[in-house]
Image: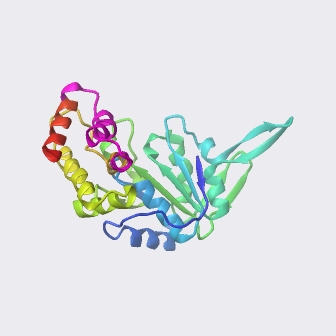
Amino acid sequence: MNVQAPVAAPFYRPVADECAVFEAAHRAGLPLLLKGPTGCGKTRFVEHMAARLGLPLFTVACHDDLSAADLIGRYLLRGGETEWVDGPLTRAVRAGGICYLDEVVEARKDVTVVLHPLTDDRRRLLIDRTGEELAAPRSFMLVASYNPGYQSILKKLKPSTRQRFVSIGFDFPDPATETAVLAAETGLDAARAGALVRLAGHIRKLSGMDLEEGVSTRLLVYAGTLIAGGMAVERALEAAIVAPLSDDPDTQQALRDLAASVYG
């Protein structure tokens, strides 16, 4: 769990009206669900908006073992005495900040039950073990994200949970925007950033290969950072794009061939 105090807003290049929707949801006290592929900017967007609104951000990376107690808190033995310790969700409610549940579908099912009273007009957090009931202050906001492309029969949000959230769909930026993002994040000039974006466009159009998703903007930033730091383009692409995307030799070779067609 990561707690981020309000700071200068990290760089984020809006694609549409997502910033306005976020602000409107916050003003209205509505929870927000972000849907989109891995590495398309969902987490950076939340960090940007938390700083823009001047609110502390409590980020939780959800996983198979994440339980309701991990979010709310538990009793711990300290110095021979039992002491209650708040979890990140409880801390966010008390602080009136933003609690961001990254990839919420990865969490155990009991987590969504805990969220329900915070996602309707009650805006309450019930702490069974202490008997406490917290009313979320006006500034508190619950934000969750997930990748619909990775949903399975066993891992997906129930409709009854999805319909408790205002939702924003994310995708990879258009080429001009993604080029600007890469240039800002890596320090590459527009020509070299644009070449990476063209390569990404080709990879994202691949079908029938061992790729669950196309290359993310995050991986492009990694590649651009290595190139800007002086690494040869071919080696940077191998380390930041080819190897992370697939372990299949044929698929890796196809990616190298695409890179060669872009870079000559």
For the question of whether residue 118 can be seen, the reply is yes
Q: How is the image coloured?
A: rainbow
Q: Residue at x 43, y 63 (%)?
A: 11
Closest to the observer, 250 or 103: 250
Residue 83 spot, x, y in % from top left: 80, 43
Q: Nearer the viewer, residue 213 or 162?
A: 213
Q: Examine the residues drawn in magenta and state their main secondary structure.
A: helix
In which quadrant of the rendered image does the C terminus lie?
Answer: top left
Residue 169 or residue 72, whichever sits in front: 169
Q: Residue drawn 31% across and 68% down?
A: 16
Residue at position x 73%, y 51% in the image:
131
Does the magenta run of residues contain 59?
A: no
Counting from the top left corner in percent of width and height, residue 146 is at 40, 48
Determine which quarter of the picture holds residue 132.
bottom right
Q: Image height check: is 97 above or below 81? A: below
Q: Is residue 163 visible?
A: no
Q: Residue at x 20, y 46 (%)?
A: 204
Q: Which residues are magenta?
A: 224-250
Give x and y (percent) for residue 180: 31, 63
Give coordinates of residue 94: x percent, y percent: 67, 60
